[in-house]
Image (cartoon, rainbow, N blue to C red):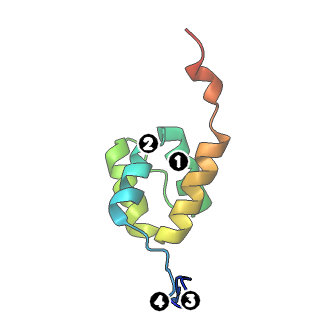
Amino acid sequence: MINNVPKIEMIRASEIKENSAIIKSQLKLLWRNELVNILKKNGLKKCAGKNKSFMCKYLWTNVLPEKLLEQICEELFERDWTVFGKK
């Protein structure tokens, strides 16, 4: 403290780290048709007849994490949330 004023200094710049566990769990939140949309956007095969778990692993291994995060967010924003309000 200098003259009763705290001294603040930056020790290191912050950095964004992609946590693989977070990205993988976000992939699991997507519906099958949303996963298919991401596959199409990246020019990957459709994975017809494969389960959702396989599709998530396939995306994880073939798409860069930064790009995948962006596409997951796009799909969630485009999702039809009105289906949750119906009973």
Tally the numbered discs: 4
Of marks 2 and 1, which one's residue comes earlier in the chain? 2
| Amino acid type of the residue tagged 3 in the rendering | Asn
| Amino acid type of the residue tagged 1 in the rendering | Val
Looking at the image, residue 62 sits to the left or right of residue 71; the answer is left
Quadrant (top left, top right, bottom left, bottom right) of the C terminus: top right
Which residue lies under the disc numbered 1?
36
Looking at the image, residue 12 sits to the left or right of residue 76; the answer is left
Picture quadrant where residue 82 is located = top right
| Mark in the foreground, 3 or 1 | 3
**Residue 13: where, in percent of width, then height?**
51, 86
| Amino acid type of the residue tagged 2 in the rendering | Leu
Instruction: Estimate how packed mark 2 is, as few (under 14), some (14 to 19) or many (20 or more) residues with alpha carbons within 10 Å.
Output: few
Q: CA distance from mark 2 to mark 4?
A: 34 Å
Picture quadrant where residue 40 is located = bottom right
- Callout 3: helix, strand or loop? loop
Which residue lies under the disc numbered 3?
3
- Callout 2: helix, strand or loop? helix
Q: CA distance from mark 3 to mark 2?
A: 52 Å
* 56 vs 1: above or below: above
Instruction: Estimate how packed mark 3 is, as few (under 14), some (14 to 19) or many (20 or more) residues with alpha carbons within 10 Å.
Output: few
Q: Which mark, by number, is residue 29?
A: 2
Q: CA distance from mark 3 to mark 4?
A: 25 Å
Of marks 3 and 2, which one's residue comes earlier in the chain? 3
Which residue lies under the disc numbered 4?
12
| Mark in the foreground, 2 or 4 | 4
**Residue 58: where, in percent of width, then height?**
38, 59
Residue farthest to the front, as pictured: 3
| Mark in the foreground, 3 or 4 | 3
